[in-house]
Amino acid sequence: MGKTRICAATPAHAAAIGALQGLVFPAPWAPAAIAKLLGGEPGFGHLAFADGAAIAAGEDTPLGFVLCRAAGGEAEILSLGVGMEARGQGVGGRLLEAAAEGAQRRGAQALYLEVSVANLDALALYRRHGFVEVGARARYYRAEDSPKGGRAEDAHILCRTF
């Protein structure tokens, strides 16, 4: 894969984000919920596209996405996903950096996220980008939403400060 472009996500991208989220996670959000989050503060997000791909809503499938919110000096990554064909090529890292920049522009001094203790690839990615463990949530992922499918999963709470 060639270069990747990152662009701001808008409510018009909700269906494309929801479709990709459905390929990456067992319980995707409804496009209406994504559109509402991206419709104004405190929500924001970014999309990754292959260089040369159209970025207008519905014109091309994104390689990945990140959905966030920021308020009160803190920000949170609510969902980050990269399609299977784009994994291991730096797309997730580019989206993390876009989320961090967006959080800082909104006055956040820290960026949080939760990740399954079993998601070793994601944990390694987050740690490479300056996230450290600050807590845990027991059985955070319900059995039906579990990345492992079928059993509840604990989550690490990670944070990156600015």
Image (cartoon, helix red, strand yellow):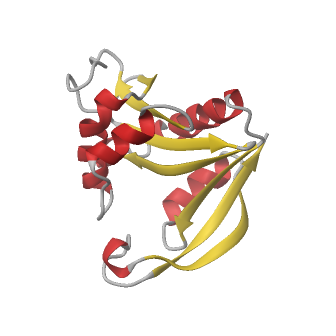
Residue located 57% across and 31% down the image: 98
- In this picture, residue 48 sits left or right of residue 117: left
- In this picture, residue 118 sits left or right of residue 12: right
| Residue 71 screen position, x and y as percent | 66, 42
- In this picture, residue 68 sits left or right of residue 58: right
Quadrant of the image for the N terminus?
A: top left
Residue 86 in view here:
yes
| Residue 6 screen position, x and y as percent | 46, 25
Q: Residue furthest bottom?
A: 151
> Which of 105 and 55 lies nearest the eye of the viewer?
105
Rendered position, 23 above or below 133: above
Rendered position, 138 above or below 160: below
| Residue 88 screen position, x and y as percent | 44, 45
Residue located 50% across and 59% down the image: 121
Q: Quadrant of residue 142?
A: bottom left
Q: Residue furthest left?
A: 59
Quadrant of the image for the C terminus?
A: top right
Residue located 43% across and 35% down the image: 38
Residue 89 in view here:
no
| Residue 65 screen position, x and y as percent | 41, 39
> Which of 123 and 41 lies nearest the eye of the viewer?
41
